[in-house]
Image: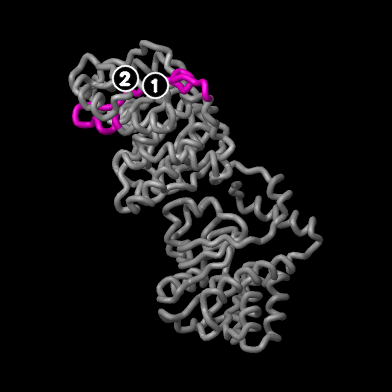
Amino acid sequence: MKIFTTEGIRRIGNRTLDRENISMLDMMERAAESVSFELMSRWRPSQRFVIFAGPGDNGGDALAVARLLALQGYHPEVYLFNIRSAHLSANCSTNRDRLLGTEGVEFIEVTNTFNPPELGRGDVVVDGLFGSGLQSPLKGGYTALVQYINNSEAYVVSIDMPSGLFGEWNQGSDSRNIIRANLTLTYQFRRLSFFFSENAKFLGDVKVLDMEYSPEAIAEMPTDFYMIEHDDVHDVVRARDPFCNKYDNGTILLVAGSYGMMGAAVLATRGAMRSGAGLVTVHAPRCGYEVMQTAVPEAIFEPDRSEIVTTAIDLHHNYSVVALGPGMGTSDETLDALDTFLKTFRRPCLLDADALYCISRRPLLLRSIPKGSVLTPHAVEFDRLFGSHQTDEERLKKAIDVSKLHEITIVLKGRYTMTVRPDGKVYINSSGNPGMATAGSGDVLTGVIASLIAQGYAPDWAVVLGVYAHGLAGDLAAQEHDVYGVMASDIADNMGRALHAIAHR
């Protein structure tokens, strides 16, 4: 599913108007009907609604919502802000005039001083001050109003966007001057900013309202951002050839594990094998021999000359893919081994966990990462590599730049894991649950992605499919253990079921 910028959505809306030969007022009425229906489905006519409308089209939507509520027996209190420094848009003015002729509405047009209504726990505030058309951070009296609403105990519903929040980038915005909604009723599409953890406190629950935008306009509008859902990966999963052998399904060299951290190697190996890899060879210190042979006897164990750390990474076969990092350790010997490997191995590889930590200790190694490689950092690992960042938004911007610069794919792990490609495309994952925030989950993902690359999936889709299937396996595990009881091994054990569910809808 495409994720559009605010400008892209505006263009889609305008093309819809042209194709349907309707006016913006007609579209606003459509939006108001959707919002008012949602409000009426949740609250009875006895509910107190206090509606704040701004001077633009978002305010016009709010005024139309007030009129439709009143026609159904509700008694909304409406405050329209028409102060001297701003003028009502033509559509907002028209909706004001329509509202003035409607019974059951307490309407106040604020042109100068404003005496705010008393708001309590049982009240519903409808925020129609500013939607996605906002051009700059809120200032002046609007900031005081936002803070007044946020400090009340009322339930807040934002139309389109919480006022003060931008659809894409919010760096530099003052969080005190953004509405904190309990419910956001957004139009047609989730916005990019909805996927950043720092904005969750502004959005509350999000419901997307269908605006019946033109399918042709949506299809024609380009974007760099996509949300990956079931239908996006359904056709990617291939059926197994009945005559295949293990080598047809790919071979993996997994450099993982160290003294006290062999569990990471076990989980990565199980993730790889449960997602279809034909053969996995694990290179690890000698201390891992009994662990690996007992926990995953299907894998080949290749011992390092050291008993407790990896000191050399030598390829004795032409593996389909090499993955490095889970539990590998960060000793000087291991760092030297990784340094030598990256400077001599010229095919794409997969780097995670301790491999990323080692690179952060020698930042010049970033230049030695083979083009086309995949890095899978969580937020802390990303910041070690590329500097401190305060928000998910900042990390995504940096990841886009770094991905292009080094021609690598970066998997930013989180609630909405984002796969960033060198061409600037960003794929936002929709599967998964909070139960997956558990030790070893990322190790399983490393194995899964390596497995799909080894099986011959196009590298870009191997990553996107791997992330989605990993999240779905976590969802299946949560069905059995609830989000409180999911362990990384449960995710690995459900990988086969997850891929089957994707392939068979």
Provide the residue designation for mark 1.
279
Give, as a three-letter code, the residue at label 1: Leu
Give, as a three-letter code, the residue at label 2: Ile
Mark 2 element type = strand
Q: Nearer the viewer, residue 325 or 172?
A: 325
From this view, report whether residue 110 is shown above or below residue 430. Answer: below
Residue 299 x %, y %: 32, 23
From this view, report whether residue 126 is shown above or below residue 364. Answer: below
Verify CB contact (< 8 Å) between mark 1 and mark 2: yes
Q: CA distance from mark 1 to mark 2?
A: 8 Å
Task: Tell me which numbered mark, 1 or 2, is placed earlier along the sequence.
Answer: 1
Q: Is residue 260 magenta?
A: yes
Horizontal side of 287 relative to 401 (left or right) equals left
Residue 55 x %, y %: 63, 71
Residue 216 x %, y %: 73, 49
Q: Nearer the viewer, residue 61 or 298?
A: 298
Horizontal side of 101 relative to 248 (left or right) equals right
From this view, report whether residue 312 is shown above or below residue 240. Answer: above
Q: Nearer the viewer, residue 143 or 233?
A: 233
Magenta stretch in the rendered image? 242-266
Provide the residue designation for mark 2.
300
